[in-house]
Image (cartoon, coloured by chain):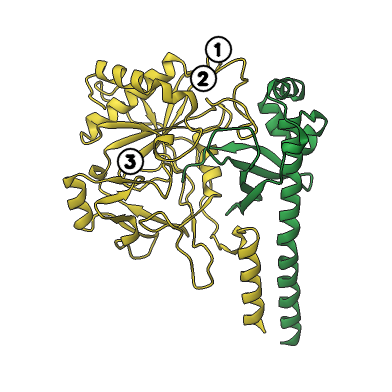
Chain colours: A green, B yellow
Amino acid sequence: MRILLIALALILSAQVMAAPAQEKEMKALFAKYYQVMEQHKVELIDEVFSKKFITDNGGKEAFTKDVKELPKFAEKNLKEADITFTKGVMDEIYFAKVKQALSKDKTAHVPEFIVVVEDGKLKIQGTLSDGD
Amino acid sequence: MILLAILLLSTTFSLHADDGSFCSVPDLSSFLPSVNLPAMPEEELIEITKVNYKRNLAASFCTRPVDMVDTIVIHHSETPETNSAMDMNAYHLNRVSYKTNDAGQFIRDSLGRKVRDPWYMIGYSYVVNSAYPGGTLPKPLVTEGRPMDIVGSHAGSAAVTTMDEDQKKMWADGKVQCGKTGGAFKVDPTQSSNGNIKANISSIGVVVVGNYAVKSSSNPNGYKPSNPRFPTLETVDTLARLACQLQKKYPRMKTIKWHNFYKPTSCPGNLEKRIDQIIILAKGYGCEFY
C-alpha cells in the first residue's frame, strides 16, 4: 500500500511539474515564431516550424521569401503572447490559441495553431480554422 | 492523501494547460478506406463520396431532425489544400471545446474549471477538395463528413441564431437530444433560450480544404500578400452544385452563410467574396438561396 502511494505521488508530481514546463516551452516557441513572422528572423525557421509545414509551404527557401514579403515590425512592439493550449485527445499534438496584443495583424480572430512534437521539441505545423 | 494530490493536480492544470491526458478514450476502430457509392441518380448534381470515419465514442454529441437545418455555412480549412477529409477528421478527433450556456458563457465545474467537450468526429458535414488556381488536384472531390442528423462543430459553439416556428416546435418537442454512444440521450437546455438556438444546430458546415486568407503572423499558411488566392470557378461551381443538391433533398435549406458571419475569424478568407456567385450559380441549377 505504501509503495503504491509513493508511486502515485511520484506520478502526480511528475505531471504537476510537466505542465508549467510545457507552458514555458510553448511560450518560448511562440516568442520565436513572432520573431520569424514579424521581425523576419528567418534563421529561426527550422526551430519554429515542423518539416511538414516547411514542405507544405514550398520548402525553406520559398517560405523565407514569403516571410520577407510580410510587414516587418520593430522588436519593441512585440509583447509576450497570451497563449492557451489543449493537448490532443488522441495524439501527441497541441492546439494553441494565441493572442498577440501588439501584433499589427488587424484581423480580429485569434488563430488556432497546430503544434506537434518533432525530435522531442514543439514545432508549429500551421493553423486550423477556429470553428467549434 | 490521494484526494489531496488529485485536488492539487486538478487545480494546477486549471492554472496551466488544459491537458487532454485526463480524458480516457477507448481504442477506437481504425480508419477505413473510402467506399464506393452506388450508382448516382441522374438528377443529382454532384458525386459525394462516403467514408467511414473514426469516432470518439467517449465524446458527447447531439442529434437533430435534418429539418432543423436551414443554413449552409462555408468555411476554409486553413490547412494545405492537399489535406483529405480523413486528415480533417484526425485533427478534429484531437480537439476539445468547452461547454457554453445559452448566453455563450463557459460552464464551469465545482472547481471552477471549464467543462471539457471533446469532439465526436469531423465537425463539418461536407468536405470539398478542389485545386487552387493553377493547382493539380485531379478534380473537385466532395466527401460527406459528419452525418446530417448529428449536430456539427463549425460555426462556433457560442454562436446562436433565431429559430423559425417549425424549428421552435421541433425544439419544444424535444427533437434535439444530446448524449454519448451507448448512453441515454436527452434534451440539453443550454442549447437554446428565448427563441434562439446554437447556430450549429440549425446549420451544416461545408469546408473547402485550403487557405484563402492572406499570410500573416496569425495565418502562416496563407497566400502571399503579392499573390492573392481566390477559389477557382470550378470550386465555386462545386459549392453551388452541392448546395443545390442538398436543397433538393432538404427543402428547408435556404440560406448560405460563411464562418465569420458568426464570429470574428479570417475563415473563409476570399471564399466569402464568392458567396453571391455560389447563390447565382445555384439558381441556374434550379435552387433558391438567400
Which residue is identified by label 1?
B134
User: Are the residues at dot 1 and dot 2 in contact (C-beta closer than 8 Å)?
Assistant: yes
- Labels 1, 3: one chain: yes
Local crowd at mark 1 within 10 Å, few (<14), some, or many (≥20)?
few
Local crowd at mark 3 within 10 Å, few (<14), some, or many (≥20)?
many
Chain at tag 2: B
Which residue is identified by label 2?
B131
Instruction: List x then y, in percent, for residue A29.
Output: 74, 44
Q: Nearer the viewer, mark 1 or mark 3?
A: 3
Chain at tag 1: B
Residue lying farthest right?
A43
Three-letter code, disc 2: Ala
Element carrying mark 3: strand
Location of the N terminus of chain A by quadrant is bottom right
Query: What is the CA distance from the residue labelled 1 to the residue labelled 2?
Result: 7 Å
Element carrying mark 1: loop
Residue lying farthest bottom?
A1
Residue at position x 58%, y 29% from top?
Answer: B80
Residue A79, picture quadrant: top right
Q: Which one is earlier in the sequence, the residue at label 1 or at label 3?
A: 1
Instruction: List x then y, in percent, for residue A85.
Output: 62, 52
Q: Is residue A35 left or right of residue B167?
A: right
Q: Is residue B244 left or right of residue A89?
A: left
Three-letter code, disc 3: Ser
Residue at position x 28%, y 50% from top?
Answer: B196
Instruction: List x then y, in percent, for residue B66.
Output: 26, 43
Instruction: List x then y, in percent, for residue A93.
Output: 64, 48
Which residue is identified by label 3?
B203
